[in-house]
Amino acid sequence: MTMPIDADARRAVAPVICYPVETLPAPDMAQYGRARETLTKVDEALVAPRDARCFTVPAGHFFRITSVEGPQVGDLNLWARHDLSERFYSGKTRALHGTHITTGQRMWSSFPTLRPMATLTHDTLDWYGMDDFGGSVHDVIGTRCDPYTNQLLSGGQYHHCCHSNLIRALADHQGISYAEAEPFVHDVLNVFMCTGFTRDTGQYFMKASPVRPGDYLEFFAEIDLLGALSACPGGDCSSKHSADTAACYPLLVEVFAPASGTLDGWQSPQPNGYDRSHGG
């Protein structure tokens, strides 16, 4: 391969942000902050290690994912409560907010609705930032560990990957078969997971999560939500996932209602306003 004489000049071209977010509708974090001072817990679900559970959150409520007992990462799916075809869109969330998300940023839904599903309101790991390896927490770049890739790389039939965990949880919650549930399981928010891309090969990496018992990630439900959370078989993802060798711990999901009147003026976002004519 012959390197062109202007190779350095081509590499030196400055990048341009694809989706400037200055015109995105901004969440009223001050109002959410006032509301969260009045919260009353109304529900909870404890997710067992190497398993998953579903939970529901009404629009205008908060939900919190907390590490309990030991360091543990989780894979989160979200759907519109009454329409599973509207689901979390990790790729568009990544394009808008970056590879990892934190307080004040949002989880966006799939086409054609493309609207905020949940806003991150509190993150006890927001101090971590970006480390010297290019790693950070709460990524929207990893897809979820799955039995198909595991079989391809390692062989065998491992059934407690996050993909399978989420399928079982959704199927049980909805009263449908695993085959019916699987198409609805989608790319996740990797809660507490510390990840990035290697500088040399650009490969997706993971490292030991900085999460400790008591750390949590909190969300405001912008629409009625159905969630499913898997406690990843990788534990804190310090060595490997999709195996029974890692130390794994439960994750706690709690749902909170704010006091009446604290969200006066807030409205659940409507579906995207594009007319869907597609130039026809």
Image: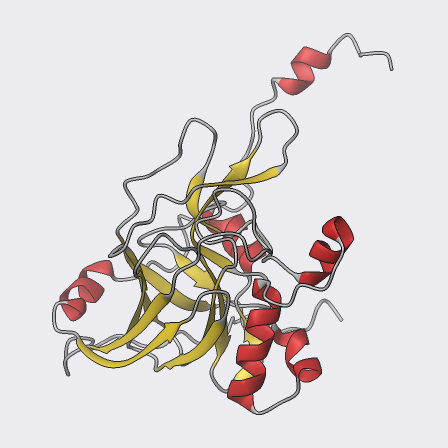
**Residue found 53% across the figure and 61% down from its top:** 188
Q: Is residue 88 above or below residue 17?
A: below
Count the marks.
Answer: 0
**Which residue shows up at 72% across the image and 67% down it?**
279
Residue 1 quadrant: top right
Q: Is residue 84 above or below residue 115?
A: below
Give the residue furthest to the bottom.
175
**Residue 280 in sight here:** yes
Where in the figure is residue 21, as x and y percent of width and height? 43, 49
Which residue is more in the foreground, 109 or 174? 174
Foreground of the two, 160 or 137: 160
User: Which is nearer the eye, 234 or 92?
Assistant: 234
Pick out the residue farthest to the top.
Answer: 5
Q: Residue at x 44, y 62 (%)?
A: 107
Q: What colour-coding does the image apply?
A: secondary structure
Please, which residue is most extreme toward the right here? 1
The image quadrant that residue 40 belongs to is bottom left
Q: Quadrant of the C terminus?
A: bottom right
Q: Is residue 102 left or right of residue 165?
A: left
Residue drawn at 76 percent across, 55 percent down:
155
> Residue 165 at what x, y percent from top left?
56, 71
The answer to whether residue 226 of the structure is visible from this angle is: no
Residue 52 spot, x, y in % from top left = 49, 72
